Image (spheres, grey):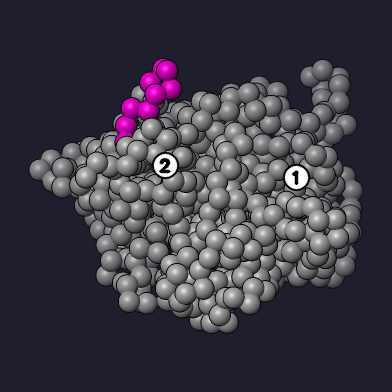
Amino acid sequence: MAQKRIFGIKNDLGLGINAIKVLQRRYLLQNEKGEVLETPSQLFRRVARAVASVETKYGQKGDVKKIEDEFYKAMSRLEFLPNTPTLMNAGTKVGQLSACFVIPVGDSLPEIFEAVKWTAIIHQSGGGTGFNFSHLRPQGDSVKSTGGIASGPVRFMTIFDKTTEVIKQGGKRRGANMGILRVDHPDIMEFIVCKSKEGFLSNFNISVAVTDAFMKAVKRNSEYSLVNPRNKQVVGRLNARKVFDLIITNAWKTGDPGIIFIDKINRSNPTPGLGEIEATNPCGEQPLLSWESCNLGSINLSKVVKNNKINWKKLARLVQLGVRFLDDVIDANKYPAPQIERITLANRKIGIGVMGFADALIQMNIPYNSRKALAMGEKIMRFIQLEGRKTSQRLGKERGNFPNFDQSVWRKKYRNLRNATVTTVAPTGTISIISGCSSGIEPLFAVSYVRNVMEGTRLQETNHYFEKIARKMGFYSSDLLHEILGNGSVQNINKVPKNIKKIFVTALDIQPEFHIKMQSAFQKYTDNAVSKTVNLPQTATPEDVRGAYLLAYRLNSKGVTVYRYNSKPDQVLTIEIQDKVSNKRQIVADSEFGGGCEGIVCPH
């Protein structure tokens, strides 16, 4: 039987329409005329062959084809996918395979524009960049070399933003940045409110690096010191609670800034002797040292459920394969800068995570907003962490430990370890579309919704598990789907049975505390960090945001991002709510694919 063609592409893996559209626009190789040159299966074969080819370096000459086939099968079955740059660039001249980079920004003009240069190069190759601007002297401070005054971090951030806008990552997608400023920087108040102006720093997520000392001052309602990074002198004091209130208010209004708990992050730093971690990748789940990069991959949990239970044996195999795949990527990678290559090869950080968690819960008949779901999330991530670490130990014994092993916290615990970190939970933006599953550990955004992707393309999606159950139980109809599309949720639709409503809860059906608790459940067994958006209804108050932040800190999250619906004009996931008064349709939208990617394209 001839294979169906969608958008002119031979759909040789039977993927969904939305998956094919995304592959066409971003992943499948094209010629100079824009004609697609490969099918989905050929894409996965290209990636598997390029990544497996480095196995010869470790004496696997006879087994390389077998390993390539294993990599190919896992990807073509949508059981495991690496981050976007690996899918785009493996086996091509570009060859840059990592999604996550942190670039240091020094206080001199040459250092600043050196960082801008590497940002452009990284974005052109498909990577996302994170920066900490806390080393820049504050606005109005003296500049001895010119006799002038400093512009300050926020103004220099606009140069990075414009650079990203111009590059547009080789024409395939917009770049993504994370801008971070310490809470004790003198320009912190300006930074907190800088994205209140619509369109300003549109290629940035921003986060405040909050310290334990600051959180204690918030609790005591006391003042804390602002320190000039140029001379380390105290230049002022602010009331911590008032600063915290400003962060809360702006996050409530616009979704920015987020918060990262920088001291918690550094307590988990596997190589503290090499320096402090100051920044993360654009979505916050990958803390990295200066110049460090990391490649990520995600296991599709919806593919490991059988007979309403997790198939732990299959999950173990996928973890083992994923760790090996990502470790190979480190060697197959063409690094954009020699300093990035040096530290990445010295620490060999990888991040195995998950997607399709909400779909897996649905298959197991577990409501997302339940204690059982929290326990399952923790159990799954603990299993992945332990199995991933075991695999890294085996690879360390076979191939050698990561070069900085003797300077790491692991030297007293293990004899062998290939990777300084093994696990990360990413938002899995576009790779979850390819896989046809829910993103990261997020709940369903909606049972039926419209996704805006790449240059105004609008794709309607309905959860296929819901559609299957509705047909089986006899309450499916096109009118029902239209009704669901009107608000995304099934909770107030009489045609849907109560037991089905419990299982198909959406992001807005869930109390904010469950978003935080789920993030914490996964963070407990994650080396790096967990990308998760705390979804709030449009009616949420700043006090709801405050509660989410304080709970996240108490439950040892490494960061937190809130998103109140309709607080941003340009979003990716939308539902159309019928306004009963004006009879007009109001667009309500989710953050960029969920998971803390507000307003920018997620590099996963």
Q: Residue 422, percent across and down? A: 40, 56
Disc number placed over residue 20 in the picture, else none: 2
Residue 31 in view here: yes
Task: Provide the residue span drawn in magenta.
Answer: 31-39
Amino acid type, residue under disc 1 in the picture: Pro
Asked whether, in this view, residue 353 is left or right of residue 255, the answer is left
Q: Residues within 10 Å of mark 1 (few under 14, many from 20)?
A: few
Disc number placed over residue 569 in the picture, else none: 1
Question: Tags 2 and 1 in contact by the CB under 8 Å rule?
Answer: no
Q: Residue 207, percent across and down? A: 70, 49
Q: Residue 302, percent across and down? A: 40, 64
Nearer to me, 554 or 296:
296
Under circle 2, the secondary element is helix
Asked whether, in this view, residue 508 is left or right of residue 298, the answer is right
**Predominant SS along the magenta part:** loop
Figure quadrant of residue 498: bottom right
The residue at the point 82 percent across, 36 percent down is: 138
Nearer to me, 589 or 315:
589
Vertically, is 107 above or below 186? above
